[in-house]
Amino acid sequence: MYRAFILSSFLLINSSANAVIYKWVDHKGIINYGQTQPQRQAITPDKIILKAHKRDPSKEAPESIIDSSNKIAESNAKRKAEKHKKALASQKARQSQKRCISSKKNLANLNYSSNRLHKDSKGNYSRLTEVDKEQRRKELVALIKENCR
């Protein structure tokens, strides 16, 4: 069925590419046009041959449906990549803002709680020495500079 459609489309395009139109003047002096010769023998028709319009190759549509679909797929892929990139940037900005807020909170707790117990990474509680507090302050200030812009 597909082949029959392609064949009939091809024949239709070729037949209309060089179509013949006849022009004649009838006995009343009226100019007529038609695709078939007039039936009366007394009228002599002029044969007008229409040629297919030549297209500018630079303005021509894509050569095939496959090329067109490939261009659309490339465009969609680019758009999807840009959207993904923006989503990642947005996610990174949210994470950075969360780190900024928590770093400021931790710095405030460190400054205002002089004799407080702090939990280490192993889950043990201990009091920080002044040297440890100063080192922790430097780390928090660095995190704040990095994440709070």
Image (tube, grey):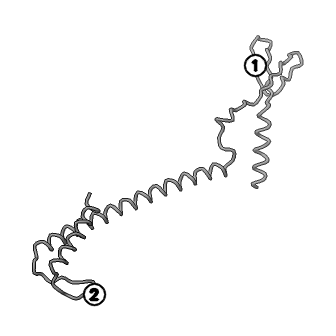
- Residue 114 is left or right of residue 103, and the answer is left
Which residue is more in the foreground, 1 or 65?
65
Q: Earlier in the sequence, mark 1 or mark 2?
A: 1
In percent of width and height, residue 87 lies at 40, 60
Q: Is residue 80 above or below residue 122?
A: above
Image quarter in which the C terminus is found: bottom left
Q: Is residue 63 above or below residue 140?
A: above
Mark 2: amino acid:
Lys
| Label 2, residues with CA under 10 Å away: few <14, some 14-19, many ≥20 | few
| Label 1, residues with CA under 10 Å away: few <14, some 14-19, many ≥20 | few
From the image, tell me which residue sits under label 2: 122
- Residue 139 is left or right of residue 62, and the answer is left
Which of pointers 1 and 2 indicates the residue nearer the eye? 2
Q: What's the distance in space between the residues labelled 1 and 2, CA to CA?
A: 101 Å
Task: Identify the disc placed on residue 32.
Answer: 1
Image quarter in which the N terminus is found: bottom right
Mark 1: amino acid:
Asn
The image quadrant that residue 29 belongs to is: top right
In percent of width and height, residue 145 lies at 25, 61
- Residue 115 is left or right of residue 101, and the answer is left
The image quadrant that residue 60 belongs to is: top right
Q: Residue at x 66, y 44 (%)?
A: 62
Q: Residue at x 58, y 51 (%)?
A: 72
Which residue is more in the foreground, 10 or 41?
10
Q: Residue at x 38, y 59 (%)?
A: 89
Q: Residue at x 80, y 42 (%)?
A: 11
In percent of width and height, residue 143 lies at 26, 66
Which residue is more in the foreground, 6 or 63?
63
Which residue is more in the foreground, 122 or 130?
130
Q: Is residue 33 above or below residue 28?
A: below
